[in-house]
Amino acid sequence: MRAFALGLPLLVLALLMSVPACEQAPGAGDEFAAGAFPPTLSDKEYHQRHWTRNDCLTCHETGVKGAPKMKHTSLPPLAKEVKCRSCHVPAGGNR
Amino acid sequence: MKLSRRRFVQAMAVSAVAGVAGCRSDSARDADLDLQGLTWHKSVCRFCGTGCGVQLAVRDGRLVALRGDPKHPTTKGLVCVKALFLPKVVHSPDRLTTPLIRKNGKLVEATWDEAMTLVAERFAQAIKEHGPDSVAYYGSGQCLSEESYLANRLFKGGIGTNNVEGNPRLCMASAVGGYVTTYGKDEPMGCYDDIEHAGVFFLIGSNTAECHPVIFDQILYNRQKGRKAKVIVLDPRRSPVRTVADVYLSPVPGYDLAVLHAMAHEIIKNQWHDEQFIRENVAFKTVVDGKPQQVSFEDYVKFLEQFAPEKVAESSGVKASEIRLAAQLFAEGPTMSFWTMGLNQRVAGVFANNLVHNLHLLTGQIGKPGATPFSLTGQPNACGGVRDTGSLSHILPYGRVVTNPEHRRQMEKLWGAPEGRIPPKPGLNTIEMFRALGENKIKCMLILTTNPGHSLPNLTPYREAMGKQREGKPFIVVADIFPTRTTELADVVLPAAMWSEKEGVFGMSERRYQLTEKLIDPPGKARPDFDILLDLAARLEKHGVVPKGYISDKFRTPEDVWNEMREASRGTAYDFTGMTRERLRKERGLRWPCPSEDHPGTARRFVKGEDPLLDQGPYADPEAKPGQVRFYAQKDKRAVIWLRPARGPAEPTDEEYPFILSTGRVLEHWHTGTMTRRVAELARAQPEAFVEIHPQDAQRLGIAQGDLVRITSRRGEAVIKARVVPTPRPGMVFVPFHWEDDASLINRVTIDAYDPGSKQPEFKICAVKLEKA
């Protein structure tokens, strides 16, 4: 009961302050850690040819043209210099 | 899923913090923040042979996240999407959790004792009635090293059969043949550190971008931010690696050996070869009447005359100017070559490997930072687990071969096997083993952690060999983590523990042995393959077909086996006696040779000052100077430049079958897809099989994007959706082999012709016809 008494106000606080919510990473929830799995790529033309691109954060850190804003603070530096496609796959199967 | 009070409070706290932190549309969400507060454990990815260092988070007995290990010395925190989704694979709801026995044609649940009693009885009966060669083991480059070693030990030294094979025969046997014939022993001399130092990358027959993404990422980094290396790509398919090529050579599939000779021709013609290196370290050989014969440098030059770029251009489809440019870049170096299935899965696979080594030896692009030939591998433990432990039909642990009486004696002594128990003749190679199964000559087969009912070439007769009901049908036992196209053919299915549910060593492509520890329990009644093998061995001892106490008195844990493996390596070119379990628990892997407990491991073999075996032991060379290369695994310490014929494919195209079919992989799925297809995100990204057809061919055949195409060879057919793209050469089609439905099983179409040396089948080339279905 004590845990629920502590948890309930926190839940209300979170709901109040997190609107509008950021994009939920797939797999978040109790089964796996929140943010465990990399978001998939939308079927935009500019996501189709990305085998050498490492400039995705140009849009995704600034939110240009409505790109969901993300950053990777703890990724090793090398990972930010190489292709994002290694970890982010197309959502709908278009290549 | 039940939410515990502790987890509820944690979840509320995280939500509140996220809210306070301003997770709103106008501020960037930190993808990594969520993963803070977890406890991370060191591990290794279980997919390809890159051997990425990873960290795993465990909560309430479950894997809840995986991330790259930034402290890993070679992969440096990089991983690919397949690894990131591994927790979903491990906790997939359709894991096998209980043993199954086939009764009246159906697999029904059984206890472990019922299943293992049946397995042992059938194996013992076969051995007693038909001899040791009536049973066989078919393993995998995904078994842990201790498991493969133990199976090899049980079958060769315990039962007394060399019918020990595994799926590395399908993917890397030609690379082994190339290393052994050129340098005297298997495995690369270079390492991943060389990627940073290379000035030129030669990518041949390797879709590195999709099949080894972390290697490709490091190549990209070098090219874009590091040394600004140039890239030569030689591949008939314009796979994503083509996007980084400075020089792109697109040969007609099967005719690339002539291109490699043409590059050598050009290197010598322009005097780009390294005369001193050749004088000190190289021998030239050809084969006459089936026997190697030494020839001179001048003989080699004369041999290469037939491969002048202009002559080769006609047969290979590669322009002479491109061959010249590639040769020039290669010679400038430092050059690191990467290859994989495009060279290995060929009837000329060993020759093709030899010709890549020829280029490195000719130019001295070897044994220096950034200069090395490097065969990439497709499984996490094909190198350390199968090649090194000698778990194929012709070899014994750590560079020994079954045809050598002294090698057999050494292993029988170490194993405590009766003298003469290991047969002097190699057992059946993979294709012949499954043929023998179809002829009922093999009566029982144990299959661990692999899916031959999907992955073998010319699949139909081999599926029938395993599963077709008939008089005298062999008894098939399969241990795996999921139902597969192989478990459906089995008489007994054993539920196996998966990576992270058991402990053992993976040995990846750069000779690095890494420990992966048990972090969670397997589901249901699933057991590690190691325990299954111990159980089987003890029962076979009781049946009297394996010497009493041969395994049951010696091993309880994987560490027990590991310590014998270290001893087996002592004094060999693989010496890793210094790799104690304790060190492997602390370190992020160690590269052999590592002959003492204070040795840090070896980056580059055969190099004085780096390779400890040049300082002491049977291969010591006190006269060599630091930095000098000494190919000590050859008797004369000289690596071999081979004068190999430019052999073409087993099944050239003709009027009836005018297209070349090549099979391969995509980034999102892995091999037969039994793991990755169970992850929703990966399945959505690549949901079904496809056949890539060049637009010119598609137009001529009236095939449009998305049409179903019937692909027919002399062996079978598949019906697959068309992707009309200019990726394959005209006249060539490409199909990834990950999907298992009957229509998509492309291995019903592929050919089982194999390289006479390596016995590796030619998955990459067969002749087909196409029609709109």
Image (spheres, helix red, strand yellow):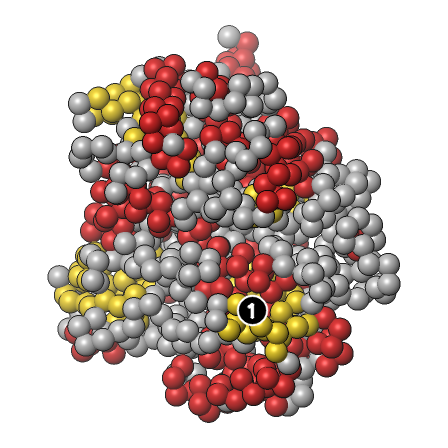
Picture quarter containing residue A31? top left
Name the chain letter of the residue that bears numbered label 1.
B
Q: Tell me what residue is drawn at x 38 percent, y 73 percent.
A: B648
Report the residue that reaches farthest toward the left.
B773
Residue B188 position, x and y percent, is 62, 57
Q: B284 and B741: which one is in front?
A: B284
Q: Left or right: B613 with respect to A41? A: right
Relative side of B27 to B652, left or right: right
Residue B772, placed above or below residue B327: above
Which quadrant would the N terminus of chain B be assigned to in this image?
top left
The secondary structure type at the circle numbered 1 is strand
Residue B429 in sight: yes
Question: How busy is the neighbourhood of tag 1: few (under 14 within 10 Å), some, or many (20 plus)?
Answer: few
Q: Is residue A25 visible?
A: no
Viewed as shown, does residue B287 lie left or right of B703?
right
Q: Position of residue B440 (x, y in %)?
A: 26, 38
Front-most of residues B689 and B352:
B352
The residue shown at (66%, 67%) is B639
Quarter of the figure with the C terminus of chain B: bottom left
- B51 over B251 or under it: above or below: above
Residue plotted at (26% across, 43% down):
B438
Amino acid carrying mark 1 in the image: Pro
Q: Is residue B60 left or right of residue B767?
A: right
Q: Residue furthest top?
A: A1
Picture coordinates of residue B628, whole percent (x, y): 79, 66
Q: Nearer the viewer, residue A46 or B483?
A: B483
Residue at image location 17% in from the left, 35% down from the top = B470
The residue singled out by tag 1 in the image is B292
Q: Is residue B684 above or below residue B628?
A: above
Q: Position of residue B20 (x, y in %)?
A: 58, 34
